[in-house]
Amino acid sequence: MHLRDRVLHRDLGQHAGQRVLIAGWLQDARDQGKIAFLLVRDRTGVTQVVAKKQELGDERYKAVTGPNRESVVALRGTVQASKAKAGGYELVLDPPGEFDVLSAAEAPLPLGVVDKVAADLETRLDNRFMDVRKPEVQAIFRLRSVLVKAGLDYFTQHGFTQIHTPRIIGASSEGGTELYPVKYFEKDAFLAQSPQLYKQAMMATGLDRVVEVATYFRAEKHNTYRHLNEITAFDAEMAFIDSEEDVMTLLEGAVHHMWKTVAEQCPAELALRNVQLTVPGLPFPRIPHAHAVERVNATGKVSVKPDDDLSTEAERVLGELMAAEGHIFYFITKYPGGIRPFYTYVDADGTSRSFDLEHKGLEVTSGAQRQHDVDKLEARLREKGLDPKDFESYLKAFRFGMPPHGGFGLGIDRLTMEVLGLDNVREAVLFPRDRTRISP
């Protein structure tokens, strides 16, 4: 049997009446004495295989019904119509009973694949290879793949070049102490907080629209349902802008395109997760930070000072207010300059040309127009308690012609969580890294 010739479950109908090879995981085997029903699962579905003792003989029948659940098997049989089975077809294992165990599974299983008893998230993550065999879990990552491709397609269609920047850096990307130090030969270095400084440098090259599927490393000692310490995101930067509004217009278009693509291309995955996806309308509302603070404080549920960022609870309350108005996506704009990173453009009134994109009370994106004047940029660094000398390789690009520019980081993990309404961002990541988890 040549495994390259195997037929997937979804294609059985094209081979009615023919003998074909299938292969996959043995999900279950029900031996009823003279006849057995095997359920063999591949990535497209589960095929029922009928095995009859009278036709196969005692020895071969015993071999077919003997393997443990989740063993990897290959077999050849004849495709026949079956009104009782999903998809309308099953496979009859006819003589000579070609059946091979490609890899035997041990018993008991560390995690059930189709068992009714639910496992907690930690057990699932400890046995992720087994957890992802579940169709409803596979659906998360098939949908995530479509989401990422849709995002890259959108950026490409709008003139963006995909780049790749270092994950090991010599200085903080954004200031602060939330860094993972590494020893780089004889030098001290860090894992990158973001590709921020590199993608900004690209704005001085003539490749003035760039995007990266980036990995962030944030050494924040939190342990919540929405935070991870290793994060995947679209990181985009664009030059020759008039204001942050140009960046927000691009961003909302990208999110709308991803949402729409998932709704059109992933109906099966959404159904497996019991999700009815609503595609958001354009444009998304813009709410200045000062107005957002006023609205949240007016509810009496939480108190936010004018120059403070919105807390998690404040974001939740604002999300409820926006949902009541029919808005699931919205921007919070014009944050106070003092609470935004050093590279953010700050106007004379102290407000910044920055924004967050929120979905139902959860931040999924942060972005801004950047400061492109090198003297003002150095002043901002000093205001933040940072030494411009430590950022000289970054600042050098600003000394020789830097156009106005801006960009954002759009979290893929959180976006996937929000599309599917998952309870925890760890479910949207194959092998998440958080405060306590570094394995598998």
Image (cartoon, grey):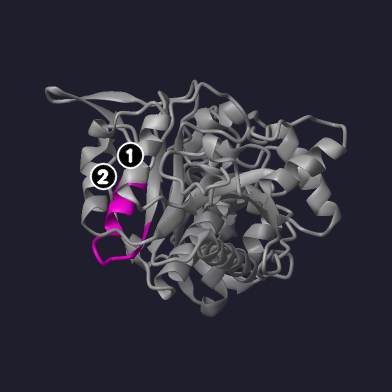
Question: Quick one: quadrant of the C terminus?
Answer: top left
Instruction: Identify which residue, 283 or 272, lies in the foreground.
Output: 283
| Residue 132 horizontal/vertical position (percent) | 53, 43
Tag 1: Cα neighbours inside 10 Å, few (<14), some, or many (≥20)? many
| Residue 210 painted magenta | yes
Residue 301 in the image: x percent, y percent? 85, 31
Q: Nearer the viewer, residue 322 or 438?
A: 322
Image position of 125 (left or right of 279): left
Residue 431 seen in the figure: yes
Per the image, is 196 magenta? yes
* Amino acid type, label 2: Leu
Image: 269 above or below 430: below
Residue lying farthest left?
186
Residue 44 appears at what percent x and percent y? Answer: 54, 61
Q: Are marks 1 and 2 in contact (CB under 8 Å)?
A: yes
Residue at which label 1 appears: 378
Q: Position of residue 389 (x, y in %)?
A: 23, 32
Mark 2 secondary-structure assignment: helix
- Extreme-front residue of the structure: 348
Which residue corresponds to the image point at 81% horizontal and 44% vertical from the top-left?
Answer: 295
Q: CA distance from mark 1 to mark 2?
A: 8 Å
**SS class of the residue under badge 1?**
helix
- Quadrant in the picture for residue 315: top right
N-terminal-most mark, 1 or 2: 1
| Depth check, front residue: 398 or 135 | 398
Q: Amino acid at mark 1?
A: Glu
Q: Which residues are magenta?
A: 195-211
- For the point 77% across and 58% down, the residue is 327
Q: Which residue is mark 2?
A: 395
